[in-house]
Amino acid sequence: MKLKDILELLEAELLTPDTDVEVDLSCAFGSDLISDILMCTKESTLLLTGLTNPQVIRLSDMIDLLGVVFVRGKRPSQDLIDMAIERKLPLITTKMTMYKSAGILYNKGLRSCQI
Amino acid sequence: MAEYWNINEDFKSRFEVFLKEKPTPAVTLESPVTKHDFTNAGNGSAELKRLLKKLGIDPVVLRKVAVASYEAEINLAAHSEGGVMKSNVHADLVHIVFEDIGPGIEDIQKALEPGFSTAIEYVREMGFGAGLGLPNIKKNSDVMHLDSEKGRNTILEIITYFK
């Protein structure tokens, strides 16, 4: 699923300007627990989360995230956004809850990442 | 002394040779871990991952090494008084040693149970403390050796083979 489709489906806002929204994202995972997210070692994944602390960037450094969706209107600090831009990591924010966001994306064919 | 070993059967004979020959690492990296410093916890793992990436290690193996070492760094920041992460890179494997200055693990078996955590609220609020740190380290390493006791320090060693 393309990033631009995800932005539209989740009525989301892109936080990292100059991101290629045509990029194809193959799978997704959702959690607020870092150890849970660290289970995704088999393939790179899009992450849906409510976590906005800088460890999200660290997580991405470890497991090569494809992008991050901050749910329920969460917004990370500008520092975190700058770190993402530096790494070319797309960040988006949606007012929808984790459950609703995941449900919509799954229904539209974005599969769950392998763990 | 309380000790725990987990050795992946596929690498058992290679590990025995490693133990016997004690080869000199090609590269060694050292990174301090400070108590409750969650801004810098993970620096050592990120540095190691960058180095291994340059060496052309497979991305899945890279992520396994990174996850195991990151979980261990977070454990040191969350539960210990501080310590050091030392990575020894060999031609076919990486051997990482985490040594802290205490206070030691009261019950190693319990600490290894998925879901068991002694993390304080402040640590949990950041998304840590799910009780999956040691299980994740075990899952993402080929050899894991944990040596600890309450009242002294903890030494965790992990080895991951590149192929």
Image (spheres, rainbow, N blue to C red):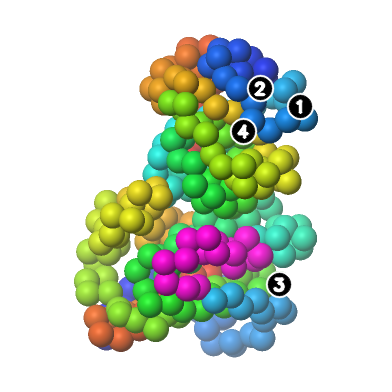
User: Does the CB distance between marks 4 and 3 fall below 8 Å?
Assistant: no
**Mark 4, chain letter?**
A
| Residue marked by disc 4 | A91
Labels 2 and 1 share a subunit: yes
Labels 2 and 4 share a subunit: yes
Amino acid type indicated by mark 3: Ala
Labels 3 and 2 share a subunit: no
Task: Mark 2 or mark 1: name the one nearer the start of the chain.
Answer: 2
| Image quadrant where one finds the C terminus of chain B | bottom right
User: Does the CB distance between marks 2 and 1 fall below 8 Å?
Assistant: yes
Task: Determine whether the residue tagged by mark 1 lies in a helix, strand or loop.
Answer: loop
Amino acid type indicated by mark 4: Leu
Which residue is nearer to you in this view: A44 or B18? A44
Report if residue B39 lies within the magenta region: yes
At horizontal 45% and vertical 62% (from top left) the residue drawn is B74
| Residue marked by disc 2 | A3
| Residue marked by disc 1 | A20
At horizontal 49% and vertical 47% (from top left) the residue drawn is A53
Task: Mark 1 or mark 4: name the one nearer the start of the chain.
Answer: 1
| Residue marked by disc 3 | B91
At horizontal 63% and vertical 55% (from top left) the residue drawn is B62
Q: Nearer the viewer, mark 1 or mark 3?
A: 1
Task: Determine whether the residue tagged by mark 4 lies in a helix, strand or loop.
Answer: strand
